[in-house]
């Protein structure tokens, strides 16, 4: 089985601040770094920590050549990563003293993905292969529809939530991995029990993982509920922790591991990722995660 991540690549501009800037306010940052990022890139690198058959499809600009090398250095195939005439996507990230973040995205080359490019990429994949998606690229609905027709296993992280997500047929997915805020936006319910009932009734064949931050996570489908305990750490920067969870879970599960083992490993990995600055550079190696208690 091959894993294709059709996802974003960004150049992250990281500002360390005392607090997230308020409207009309000007503040100074205590540190600034520029690094590769994007939910797609982060998830591909996390996937590669636990799975050897990871491919990344997407587009980058003239200013993003180093991003391709980062993926390749992490064992991710870039055969389907193409250069665009547009600039690479950017993310302006504020990280406060508690490790919480606020992000502004510039779409750039991530929205230069058209149907012809999608067709060209997907012709290299077939029934049973896994497709990983986020909502930071163009043609998302078309990608899902085409992959569904090919009977690929589709895993979506619906972030960021916008009108694109509400236009998708979620019944075509195998896994939906989302946080509480995203679950509330999609279901229109705020209570976890009501959210669970909504998804079970509306999408009975969908497998859901609801991440709950410091409260752990919950897996549920139409037949079972599995609760995953949290691994509590002192957070330094939560940027990329959710992407680490997604990559570790999907990569491990589709390598043949159980839901329980994949959840536990993903929870450890995301906790460890939040103890370091940055996004892709904070993703821990498998041996470190596996030995974490």
Image (cartoon, helix red, strand yellow):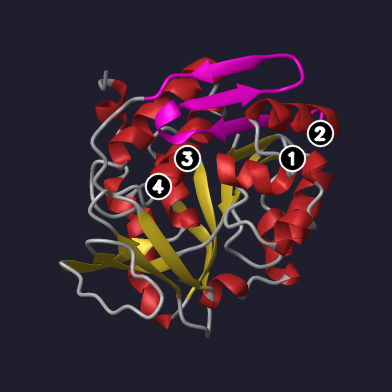
Q: Residue 218 colored magenta? A: yes
Callout 1: helix, strand or loop?
loop
Between tags 4 and 1, which lies in front?
Answer: 1
Report the residue at 70% width, 33% height from top. Answer: 195
Report the residue at 24% width, 75% height from top. Answer: 27
Please give the residue where the numbered disc 4 appears in the rendered image.
45
Between tags 2 and 1, which lies in front?
Answer: 2
Callout 2: helix, strand or loop?
loop
Real-space CA distance between mark 4 and mark 1, rounded to the nearest whole angstrom:
22 Å
- Where is residue 192 shown, x and y percent of the image? 64, 29
Neighbor class of circle 4 (other Cα within 10 Å; few <14, some 14-19, many 20+) is many
* Picture quarter with the N terminus: top right
Please give the residue where the numbered disc 3 appears in the rendered image.
247
Between tags 4 and 2, which lies in front?
Answer: 2
Neighbor class of circle 3 (other Cα within 10 Å; few <14, some 14-19, many 20+) is many
Image check: 111 left or right of 118?
left
- Where is residue 280 shown, x and y percent of the image? 34, 52
Callout 4: helix, strand or loop?
helix
- Where is residue 18 shown, x and y percent of the image? 22, 61
Q: Nearer the viewer, residue 200 or 268?
A: 200
Real-space CA distance between mark 3 and mark 2, rounded to the nearest whole angstrom:
23 Å
Neighbor class of circle 2 (other Cα within 10 Å; few <14, some 14-19, many 20+) is some
Real-space CA distance between mark 3 and mark 1, rounded to the nearest whole angstrom:
16 Å
Mark 2 in CB contact with mark 1 (< 8 angstroms): yes
Q: Nearer the viewer, residue 118 or 203?
A: 203
Report the residue at 79% width, 39% height from top. Answer: 151
Report the residue at 28% width, 55% height from top. Answer: 278
Q: Nearer the viewer, residue 171 or 44?
A: 171
Please report whichever mark, 4 or 2, sits nearer to the chain's N-terminal start.
Answer: 4
Mark 3 in CB contact with mark 4 (< 8 angstroms): yes
């Amino acid at each position: 089985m091959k894993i294709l991540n059709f996802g974003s690549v960004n150049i992250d501009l990281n500002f360390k601040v005392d607090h997230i800037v308020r409207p009309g306010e000007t503040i100074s940052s205590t540190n600034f770094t520029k690094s590769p990022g994007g939910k797609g890139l982060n998830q591909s690198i996390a996937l590669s920590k636990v799975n050897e058959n990871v491919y990344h499809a997407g587009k980058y600009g003239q200013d993003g050549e180093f991003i391709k090398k980062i993926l390749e250095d992490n064992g991710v195939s870039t055969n389907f990563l193409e250069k665009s005439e547009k600039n690479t996507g950017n993310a302006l990230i504020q990280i406060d003293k508690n490790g919480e973040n606020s992000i502004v995205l510039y779409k750039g080359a991530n929205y230069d993905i058209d149907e012809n490019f999608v067709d060209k990429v997907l012709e290299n994949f077939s029934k049973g292969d896994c497709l990983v998606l986020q909502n930071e690229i163009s043609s998302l609905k078309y990608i899902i529809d085409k992959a569904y027709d090919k009977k690929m296993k589709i895993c979506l992280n619906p972030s960021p939530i916008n009108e694109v997500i509400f236009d998708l047929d979620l019944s075509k997915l195998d896994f939906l991995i989302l946080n509480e805020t995203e679950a509330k936006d999609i279901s229109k319910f705020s209570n976890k029990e009501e959210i669970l009932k909504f998804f079970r009734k509306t999408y009975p064949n969908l497998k859901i993982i609801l991440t709950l931050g410091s409260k752990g996570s919950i897996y549920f489908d139409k037949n079972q509920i599995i609760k995953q305990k949290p691994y509590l750490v002192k957070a330094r920067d939560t940027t990329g922790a959710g992407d680490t969870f997604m990559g570790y879970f999907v990569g491990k599960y589709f390598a043949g591991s159980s839901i329980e083992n994949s959840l536990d490993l993903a929870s450890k990995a995301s906790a460890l990722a939040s103890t370091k600055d940055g996004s892709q550079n904070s993703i821990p190696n498998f041996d470190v995660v596996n030995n974490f208690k």
